[in-house]
Image (cartoon, helix red, strand yellow):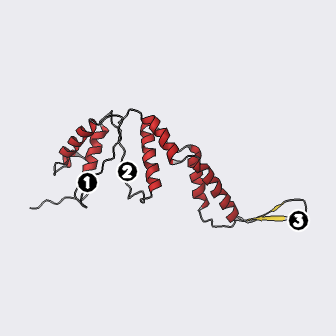
Amino acid sequence: MSKYTSDQPITEPTNDEFNRAVFATDFIKIISNFKDTESYVIGLYGKWGSGKTSTINLILKQLASKNDIYSISINAWALGGDHEIILWDILNQISTKLTDKKAKTKRARFGHLLKKVSKAELPFDLSSEIPLDSSTKNNMNSSSGKILNTVSYLGQILSSSDNISLARNRIESYIKNKK
């Protein structure tokens, strides 16, 4: 009788049939000996279906029990591969782990929200007449396009107040001697 297994990545060492947990344990020992003041980027390479996600899951599981090492995990594919979105995700995860606060300021997050709102397609027209004086001759038409452009511009100003390098500098001050 044959045994069928799912192609889903494992998350628990009890499901490890290929001794990936041994690799994960050795990996944790190695990174535990890194100097506090150094930064590292570590990549795990392998063919499709070779168990990279399972291995990462086992490493993250072990890292979760460590009080002296902070870890984050990103999925660039799920983030659409946009480098700015990926960088903000990394900065937000680090900031949240260390301070329970997002990397972006509230003002910048509000600015990004305004930019998104300005790109929305409205199901109605916002055209209206605004009397500039008491006469009915001088009226100004304000179109939805002008309003949305103004909202977009305001969003751009607010969101640009907090750029990646400023956020990175704030987060570097939080990290100091943490792994």
**Residue at image mark 2:** 74
The numbered mark, 1 or 2, whose residue comes first in the sequence reads 1
Q: Are marks 2 and 3 in contact (CB under 8 Å)?
A: no
> Residue 140 appears in which quarter of the rendering?
bottom right
Q: Position of residue 43 (x, y in %)?
A: 30, 51
Q: Are marks 1 and 2 in contact (CB under 8 Å)?
A: no
Q: Residues within 10 Å of mark 2 (few under 14, many from 20)?
A: few
- The three-letter code of the residue at mark 2 reads Ile
> Residue 59 appears in which quarter of the rendering?
top left
Residue 141 position (above or below residue 108): below
Which residue is pictured at 30% across the width and 48% down the height? 42
Q: Residue 52: give its label.
A: 1
**Residue at image mark 3:** 136
Can residue 143 be seen here? The reply is yes
* Separation (CA) of disc 1 from disc 2: 14 Å
| Kind of element beneath mark 3 | loop
- The three-letter code of the residue at mark 3 reads Thr
Residue 56 position (above or below residue 135): above
- The three-letter code of the residue at mark 1 reads Lys
Of residues 178 and 20, which is closer to you in this image?
178
Q: Residues within 10 Å of mark 3 (few under 14, many from 20)?
A: few
Can residue 103 be seen here? The reply is no
Q: Position of residue 177 (x, y in %)?
A: 38, 32
The numbered mark, 3 or 1, whose residue comes first in the sequence reads 1
Of residues 82 and 115, which is closer to you in this image?
82
